[in-house]
Image: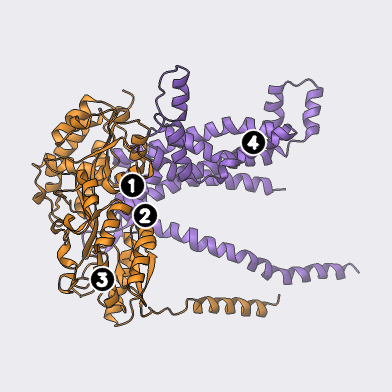
Chain colours: A purple, B orange
Amino acid sequence: MTITPASDIVGTKKSGRPVGLLLVAVPVLLVCWMVIWPIISAITRTVWLPNEGSGRSFSLDTYKFFFSDQYSLNNLNVTLWTTTVTALLLLLVCLPIALYLRFAKGRLAAYVQGLAIFPMFVPSIILSYAIIRVLGPNGTVDLLFNAVGLPHIRSPYLTPWGPVIGLVWDNIPLTVLILLSGLGNVSNQSIEAARDVGAGRLALLWHIILPRISNSILVAVSFTVLGIFSAFTLPYVLGPAAPEMMGPFMQRTFRDLNDPTNAITQAVIAFCFCLVFGLFYVRSVAKNRAP
Amino acid sequence: MKRRAFMLSVGGAAAGMVLLPRMAFAEAGRIDWYTSSDQNILDFWTNIVKPKFEAANPGVTLNLVDAGDAAGQTAIGERALAAMQTKTDPQADYFESADWRLPAGAADAGLYVNIKEAGLSNYSKINPLAFDGDFSVPYRGSQVLLAYDTTKLDPANAPKTFADLVTWIKANPGQFIYNRPDKGGSGGNFVRRAILEANGKDLGKFKIDNYTQEAGEAALNPAWDILKDLSGSLFDNGAYTSGNTQSIQLLGQSAVTMIPAWSDQAIQAINTGVLPETTGLVQLQDLALPGGFSRSVVLSNGVNKDAALKLADFILTEEVQSAVLSELGGFPGVAWDYVSQDLREKYKDVIPTTIPAFPGGDWEKAINDGWYRNVAPNVDRSA
C-alpha cells in the first residue's frame, strides 16, 4: 500500500516539470537575449579587429591602448575612488538610520523613514541642479554661512566631491531599505538576552547585530557599487571635466568621438570590475538559499 | 495548461505581434515634419508656426514629429532615400534643421529640393551670411557672445577683442568660466575662437575635408597653449561646466562675472528672469565668436512637397521671422531690413556683422578629444 502515494508524487512531478520550466524560460531567454548575448558580442567586437588587410583578426590593441593611456587610467582611477568613497560614506550614513528605524517606535520614526526614502522619488537630473543651487558657489549654504560671518566655503561643485555627495544622497533609500530588511533578522529576544548578561551598546552592535546583518551589508554594498560605477547624470553635471568617471567617458567616446570600439572596450573593462561585486551578491544569495 | 494549448496561445501571440505594426501612409494635406532640435524649438513650432501656417493655408495641417537627435533625423533621411530608390512613400516632407550633406549621397540622388530654383517668393530676403549651398532654407540663427554682469563690470570696459578678453580674464581670476567644448556649444565656440586666434584669425584654414593629423596638431597645439595659460585664472582654478545652462546658472548666482553664451539662450534667460536685467551682452569686434544658422530642407519625394515648399516660404515671412527674434531669441534668417524696426532697435547689440562658422566632421572630433586630453587635466586644482 505504500506504492500508491509514491507513484502519485512521481506522477505530479512529471506533469509539473514542463510548466515550471516554461515559467522560467521567459526570463532566462530575456537574460540571454538582452544581457548575455550583448556581452559576448561586445567582447568579440573589441578583440576581433580589422587588420591591415581586408579581414579581421584577433587583437588586444584597444585594451593595450586603454591600459597604456594615462588619460584613460586616470578616468578609471577616479571611478574606483568615487565608488569606494561613496560606498563607505553610504554605510556610515545609512547604518545609523537603519538601526534607528529598526528600534525606534512612534511618529518621529515614521517621518525619518519617509525622509530617508524621499530621494528615491527625485530624478537625478533635478537633484544635480538642486545641488548646484544649494552647495554650489554662492548657493544657499554659502549664503547662510556668510550671514553668520563665516568665510566662503570651497564648493564641491565641479570637483570629484560633487558626484560623491550627489551619489550618496541618491543611494540612501536603497541602502537603508536593504539594511532594514536585514535588521528584521535580529530578534528582540536575542538583544534582550545580551542586555541581561550586561552587554553594552557597542558590544551589542558588534557581537549581536553586525554578524546577523553582514549578509545585508554585502548585498547593499554590491548593489550600490554597481549603480555608482555606471553612474552617468550626477558625474556628468557635477563632476570635473577631467578626470571623468567611466559613464561620461564612455558616452563621450561613443558619441562625440564616433569611436564605438574604444567605447565598448571601456564598457567591457567597467563590466569586469562590476562582475566582481556581482559575484559577491550572487554568492551571498546562494549562501542564504542553502538549507 | 496542456502543452498543446500553451503552444497554440504562444504561437498565436507571436503571430499577432508580427502583424501588429499596421501599415501607415502619408496623408495628403498633412505635412510630415521632423526636427532634431531641442524642446524650445518644437514648442515654438507647436505654439506659433503651426497655428499661423494652418490659418493661412486651409486644408493643410502640420504633423510635428520629434526625431530625437541628429542621428534620429538622419535615419529618417536614410529611410526617405531608400524609399526614393524603390519609388515608395517616404512619409516625410520637411526637416526643420538639417545638413543637406547627410545622409551621404542624398543631395546627389536628388532627395532634397533645390530651394534656389524652387521659386520661393521670400528667397531673396535671406541674409547672405546665412547660405550654405542651394538645398536648404536658413531661417534662424544663433551665435555665441559674452554675457556679463554689468554691476561688476562697466559696459564701457567690456572686452572688445580676444586679446582684451584674455587680459581681462587674467586680471580678474576666478570670474570667467566656459563649458566643455562638446557639451552645449557655447564653450565649444569659445574654444574655436581661441583656435582661430592662434591661427591668425584665418577661417579659410579650416574646411570640412582638410583635416589631417599633422594639420590638426599644427593648428590646435598653439590654441591649447592659450587655453592652458588661461585655465589657472578661470573659476575655481580651472573648472569647466558641463553645459550651457550651468554656465548661465553660475552667472545668475553671481559666482562669475562673465561667460560665453548662445545669443538665443541669453536673451531668453534675460526675458524669463533667469538672468537679471543687469546682464550685459557683448560681441568681440576683431572677429566674432562663431555661431551658425539652422537650415530647413524639403524632401523632393514627399507626398506633400508643394505644401512643404509653401511652409518653407512661410517661415521667411516677417511675421515668423520677427517671432524667431522675439519668442525664440534667435537671429532671423532673413536680412535685418526685413524685421520690424523696433525689434531691430532692441537687439542692435547682438546683430552680427559676421558669423564665423567652423566646420564639423573630423575637426570637431580633434578639437573635443584634444581639449579633454590637453587642456582639461592640466590644472592644479588644489592650488
Look at the numbered disc 3 and give the secondary structure of its residue.
strand
| Label 1 crowd (10 A; few <14 / some 14-19 / many >=20) | some
On residue B159, the disc is: none
Q: Which residue is mark 1?
A: B268
Q: Which residue is mark 3?
A: B298
Residue drawn at 43 percent across, 45 percent down? A233
The alpha-carbon separation of the residues under discs 1 and 3 comes to 29 Å
Residue B31 appears anywhere in the view: yes
**Residue A115: horizontal and vertical position, in percent?**
62, 37
State the residue lying farthest toward the front: B342
| Label 3 crowd (10 A; few <14 / some 14-19 / many >=20) | many
Residue type for callout 3: Val
**Observer-nearest of A1 and A130:** A130
Look at the numbered disc 2 and give the secondary structure of its residue.
helix
- Kindly identify which chain the residue marked by label 4 belongs to: A
Residue type for callout 1: Gln
| Label 4 crowd (10 A; few <14 / some 14-19 / many >=20) | some
Dot 4 and dot 1 residues touching (CB under 8 Å): no
Q: Which label's residue is closer to the chain start, 2 or 1?
A: 2
Which image quarter holds the N terminus of chain B? bottom right
Q: Which residue is mark 4?
A: A214
Which-is-in-front pick, marks 2 and 1? 1
Dot 2 and dot 1 residues touching (CB under 8 Å): yes
The alpha-carbon separation of the residues under discs 4 and 2 comes to 51 Å
- Location of residue B155 with respect to B136 vertically, above or below: above
Are both tags, 4 and 2, on one chain? no
Which-is-in-front pick, marks 1 and 3? 1
Which-is-in-front pick, marks 4 and 2? 2
